[in-house]
Amino acid sequence: MPVRVLVFRHTPVDDLGLIASALDSQGILREYADLYAHSCAEPRVNDADALIFMGGPMSANDDYPYIQREIHYIRDAKERGQMVLGVCLGAQLIAKALGAQVHVNTVKEIGWAPITFATAAASDPIFTGLRAPEMVFHWHGETFVLPPGADLLASSDACRNQAFRLGNCIYGLQFHLEVTPSMIGEWSHEDEACGDAREVKQRVDQLEQAELVAVHGAQAVAGERLRRRGEGVLGGPQHQRQRGAELVADVREEGGLRAVELRERLDPAPLLLEGARVRDRGRDG
């Protein structure tokens, strides 16, 4: 039987994004459970091999009925040994469901910023092989305490708890591994999110902080070719109009490729497949 994943969205624009292509590449079926929509039927949670909880502008501490239902589903999934992945709000929901506190972060972390990997990441099935800092996208104002027994996998300067694993089946990612350029654009224009965006001193780039990458990270992101071109653009104002837009376009293109590459390296699909096989063996037994 094919592996089936149940995905919990919280707004129409908080979608699987790049994670969808990872699932598709492994033939993993997905079904959406939009509990925030009153017309949503009761999801078949027990029949799914894995549950994925996406982000959204609400809080895990909100008393919405659908938030409480999702917290209940997470607790039950842990007891069943069901695979669970949470992204941003989804990670906060996992933390709250498993007894940890969700609270306001010291700053709103919005835009592109690097994460570094903790010691436990070296032996993790998904994070293994990642050593150097990776540039990822963030959009959150709250954070969480690690659930009891969880291993910290990644941190950023603005938020310590960026990724965790609990046991072999539960992962929480505070950062947004899944984003596409169109998703970031939609978030920036959403009424709920615009208040956050106005508080950010640095603009939110849909693909990458292209100018910052050109100055500080073009060689790592885009190679020697872009580094040389970046020096030309930044060398004087007379070059900016002629070559600036061209540089930004190339850095964005390479930055987008880097985002896809990181998604492929942090690919949850093999783990979901293995979890489904383990769960099937348990059913057969």
Image: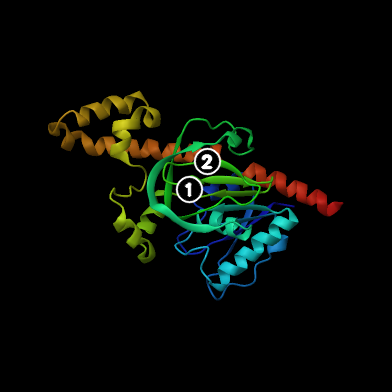
- Helix or strand or loop: what does disc 2 sit on? strand
Nearer the observer, 68 or 32: 68
Nearer the observer, 20 or 191: 191
| Residue 189 visible in this rendered orientation of the protein | no
Residues at marks 2 and 1, CA–CA distance in whole angstroms: 10 Å
Q: Which mark is residue 154?
A: 2
Nearer the observer, 197 or 144: 144
**Tags 2 and 1 in contact by the CB under 8 Å rule?**
yes
- Helix or strand or loop: what does disc 1 sit on? loop
Q: Amino acid at mark 1?
A: Phe
Q: Locate residue 61, reporting x and y percent.
A: 52, 65
Q: Amino acid at mark 2?
A: Ala
Q: Locate residue 240, reporting x and y percent.
A: 17, 35
Q: Residues within 10 Å of mark 2 (few under 14, many from 20)?
A: many
Q: Residue at x 75, y 52 (%)?
A: 1
Q: Residue at x 63, y 37 (%)?
A: 124
Count of marks overlaid on the render: 2
Q: Quadrant of residue 229?
A: top left
Q: Is residue 204 left or right of residue 60?
A: left
Q: Look at mark 1 in the image and give the residue it sits on.
A: 175
